[in-house]
Image (cartoon, rainbow, N blue to C red):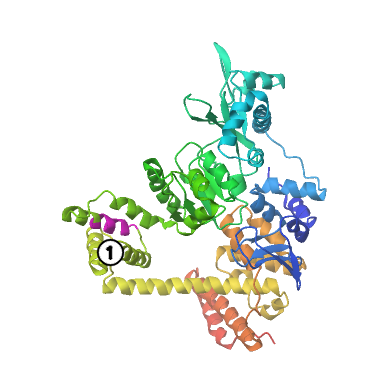
Amino acid sequence: MRYSEDAIEEVRMKNDIVDVISGYVKLQKKGSNYFGLCPFHNEKSPSFSVSPGKQMYYCFGCGAGGNAITFVMEYENYSFSEALKVLADRAGVKLPVQEYSKEARAQEDLRAALLEINKLAASYFYYQLKNPQGELGYKYLRDRELSDETIVRFGLGYSNKTSDDLYRYLKGKGYDDAILKQTGLVTIEERGTYDKFWNRVMFPIMDVNNRVIGFGGRVMGTGEPKYLNSPETKLFDKSRNLYGLNYARLSREKYILICEGYMDVIAMHQAGFTNAVASLGTAFTLQHAQLLKRYTDKVILTYDSDGAGIKAALRAIPILKEVGMSIRVLNMQPYKDPDDFIKNLGADAFQERIKEARNSFLYEIDVLKKDYKMDDPEQKTAFYNQVAKKLLEFPEALERENYLEAVSREFFINYEDLKRLVNRLGASLGIAGTASRGEEEKGFKGQKKKDKEDGVKQSQRLLLTWLIENPVLFDKIHGVITPEDFIEELYYNVARMVFDGHAAGTLNPAEILNHFINDDDQYRAVAGLFHASLNESLNNEEQKKAFSETIMKVKKNSLDYASRHAEGIEELQRIIKEQAALKDLHISLD
């Protein structure tokens, strides 16, 4: 069920945002606001602002913004309900009991039980590792140069050689076969019952909220398969989870390192690279990319340097591009994987390789080139044609031009010759390499139209921001501007709440933001409205001019829009009169 607006607002009001955020970020008061280092991106100079007056936060570096509820959501990666419950408990607010259908309640109870069983299993595996029966597993981890601190941090354990060891333990805790079948930890058949994992070093797999949702196991000895993962369960979907993300999401780095396996992630974290993650025994998926996109726009692929690692990188690159990631590829040579590299050359050398990581498109060209003998004219020509085809993957002419220049420089291909080849190939494929004069004029007109539309949005955004920042301005626009003059749907909805709040004497930016919590794009746009000021970088005369011009733009755009959608001659005549009267309109800050 959805909580009422009154319940949500009570929780928000009883959690002062400065107190809440101070539990996560060191804040220092400057003027009427507090500032600190943004927890959502890496920065050296504080650009993260917390306003006790507005009960909101905003980062001028990355654009993150919101109220106390949304801060907990973003920082802890909680759902709205989870964040609300945390803050309600913090403030001693009793939320109304959520009512579930019988079926929904059964599903919630099942999830809770599976989480508890996984937690018990993780503790049991850890206990085995530190006892005589786990000596084989513990020796393996120590031989891999993992410290006891790292073993504890990742909750590593050992599953005994006895084939039903865990099953008997869980039965002893009171769990019946019906639920144990659904954990993925045991197999129950007519011919017998046995554990999914035995004689393996165990890697608990955690979700971003540090809850154990599954396991991976590395066999001790020569058994097969070498690595074994939990099957899909109500909790565990390997295509939607990444190993190590529960820690990596809290890293202050601007990028995330993607590698292949558990040990690479653990070794990198131990070496100080706490922003490393790995997929869970499956190829990298679009769901993985979308999950990462919540935390970063930049990734560095650190896959193995062998053939399989190269193929994995080439598969991952287009998937990451699809969600708008900036991608680079790390050169691991002469070693196979990050673990070997760090053991042999150290963390400082690995950091240097990160700085030198290859642009993903140029990496693709590097790999492509290996398939051709460049001393053979025919193969050399074929290579150039493939390069030209790859360049046409960029839909934007400017971006394509930038990469064309880079490829020409990096691979010693004559720039003009390569450009002609790209244009000719593009024309044959129906992808214009260069626009005709008519197309250029069409593009210019299209750009002018887009610029005008952007200007309309900007004027509405500015006016809303100023009204929120300085409610005295409502007196200046009385009788001239109403919520209906904000023709962008999002800004109209915000304007209606802002005007109503001002009229009632209860204008509350943090409360308004609650209405947009279910749409990330709208939420960010609205949060941004509450963090600007008319007097920023403007002198007094400039302020007056900017305010007056913005009022005129908003009103003119509103009337233009109304005239295009007038339903009758009388309405149109009224609008025309209002348009004519605009030239005599004078609104000033004085």
Quadrant of the image containing the N terminus? top right
586, above or below 8, in the image = below
- Magenta segment main secondary structure: helix
Q: Which of 242 and 277 is in front in this view?
A: 277
Q: Quadrant of residue 96?
A: top right
Is residue 254 visible to us here?
yes
**Numbered circles on residues, count:** 1
358, above or below 54, in the image = above
Magenta span includes 387 = yes
Q: Give the range drawn in magenta.
A: 384-393
Q: Image check: 380 left or right of 332?
A: left
Magenta span includes 307 = no
Q: Image check: 34 left or right of 489?
A: right
Q: Image check: 418 left or right of 167?
A: left
Q: Identify which residue is drawn at 69% across, 63% down.
A: 57
94, above or below 232, in the image = below
Q: Which of 373 and 421 is in front in this view?
A: 373
Residue 551 horizontal/vertical position (percent): 60, 79
Is residue 235 visible to us here?
no
Amino acid under disc 1? Phe
Task: Return the residue at label 1.
Answer: 412
Q: Nearer the viewer, residue 561 or 462?
A: 462
Residue 407 horizontal/vertical position (percent): 32, 62
Residue 225 horizontal/vertical position (percent): 47, 27
**Most distant residue in the top direction:** 191
Secondary element under disc 1, as helix, strand or loop, is: loop
